[in-house]
Image (spheres, rainbow, N blue to C red):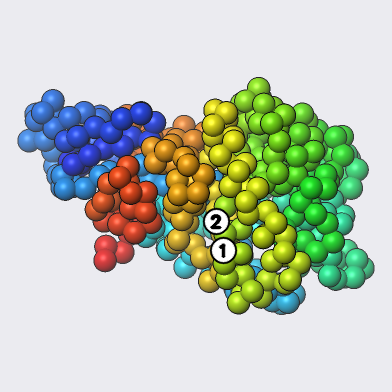
Amino acid sequence: MGDTTVVTCGQLIDGQADEPVSDAVVVITDGQITDVSTREAASGQLSAADTVIDHSGETVIPGLIDAHLHLKGWPSMDQSDYLTYDVAAGAARATTHLRRLLDAGFTTVRDVDSRTGLGLRTAVEEGSIPGPRIHTSHRAIYQTGGHGDPHYLRHEWVDQYNPYDPALCDGADECRKEARKRIRDGVDLIKIGTTGGVLSEKDHPEQPQMTDDEIAAVTQEAHRVGIPVAAHAQGARGIRNALQNGVDTIEHGIYIDDAGIELLRETGGVLVPTLAIVDRICEVGADHGIPEFGLEKAREARAAHVDAVRRADDAGATVALGTDFVGPELVPHGENAVEAVLYVEECGMEPMDAIRAATSRAAQTLREQSVGVIEPGRHADLVALDRDPLDDITALRDSIAAVYKGGERVDDGT
Ligand SMILES: [Zn+2]
């Protein structure tokens, strides 16, 4: 057994329970949480500890999880920049983004479409670069003409090389084969697109994409090896098609209807809203190269998206935090906790539920039992906050005092 570290916490929010605990202690051995109790009950462990970390003046929460982001390392959100995208440069930029995510308290992330996620996951796991734990889908699967197809380019060019990351597949057989290729590569989940989107020119979020057979071909292959399927799904019909054909998580869910929310509850599915990107596009998208059609669709979507989160949360569906941030200034990694602030300030979510969305519920979205809750048996991924997020949710964004991954301090400490 390795050295024992005890973290004293002024207040502990474990990511799962309804109430916080005052004067708590977290005991860590070999990077794992081995005990959680109160200072009073743990006085013996405190005096025997090899190291004591004092956060008795702070609130300690689990390491945050962003269940929908991209580690593409795009230099900007200007579509003309995608044409010269270089994978190596993208990966290099993404290493800076990973560093910023750690500093912001995000110790686990789910990358849902990139060409870089698998390599970055390897580099973080082997200790070559610092970063959060990474779950990745690698390249997503979309239909020709779908959200992942750059509509502004000639099809002949895209057929040769899609400057976006997704693979374009048509028919159940092609979708199945592409899913099997992802599984062969060792992905943590498969990402598909079952509706149009905001930043794709010639479709609309309300339009369904992929047939039932195509969706089912992917979910069958994924479930056979025990990994989930995430669907970019914004319109009501495409959300229902996804859930009725085995999809596990609905990404965005902007125009989800009551039947979609009911299906989420029936199937144990998760809604991963991404208010942060829609909010940023509406606020400052025009200054960052977002074309007029994207600005217009984002403005249309904003109120509906807020309403979707509110209705899903009120109905008791599981909501997990995602931002759709990509890295460039418009959607910057490191400011991802703004999503939780939007849940509370705009959707009326309780601060404790916003914290759960960013911890235990996000872990559930990833099917990951080793993170997201401060309890014995999980990784010692912890964030200390100067201010109490239950009083003011902006504490998640603005008052990070220290970040630990596997019991080791990983933020820059300033
Ligand atoms: Zn996304």
Q: Quadrant of residue 100?
A: bottom left
Q: Quadrant of residue 116?
A: bottom right
Name the residue rendered at 7%, 35% in the picture. Answer: 47
Looking at the rendered structure, the kind of residue marked 1 is Arg
Image: 364 above or below 404 = above
Give the camera-side residue of 314 and 240.
Answer: 314
Q: Secondary structure at mark 2?
A: helix
The quadrant of the rendering that contains the N terminus is top left
State if disc 2 and disc 1 touch (CB < 8 Å): yes
Give the camera-side residue of 156 and 122.
Answer: 156
Name the residue rendered at 72%, 51% in the picture. Answer: 140
Give the camera-side residue of 341 and 163.
Answer: 341
The answer to whether any part of residue 108 appears in the image is no
Task: Where is residue 57? Give x, y as percent.
Answer: 16, 48
Task: Say few, some or many: other residues with alpha carbon within 10 Å of mark 2 (under 14 / 14 to 19 / 20 or more).
Answer: many
The quadrant of the rendering that contains the C terminus is bottom left
Image: 86 above or below 180 = below
Task: Where is residue 300? Give x, y as percent.
Answer: 70, 56
Q: Which residue is mark 1?
A: 280
Check residue 344 in the rendering and tell me which mark sits there, or answer none.
Answer: none
Name the residue rendered at 27%, 46% in the picture. Answer: 388
The answer to whether any part of residue 200 appears in the image is yes
Task: Say few, some or many: other residues with alpha carbon within 10 Å of mark 1 (under 14 / 14 to 19 / 20 or more).
Answer: some
Q: Which residue is mark 2?
A: 276
175 horizontally vs 317: left or right: right
Q: Secondary structure at mark 1?
A: helix
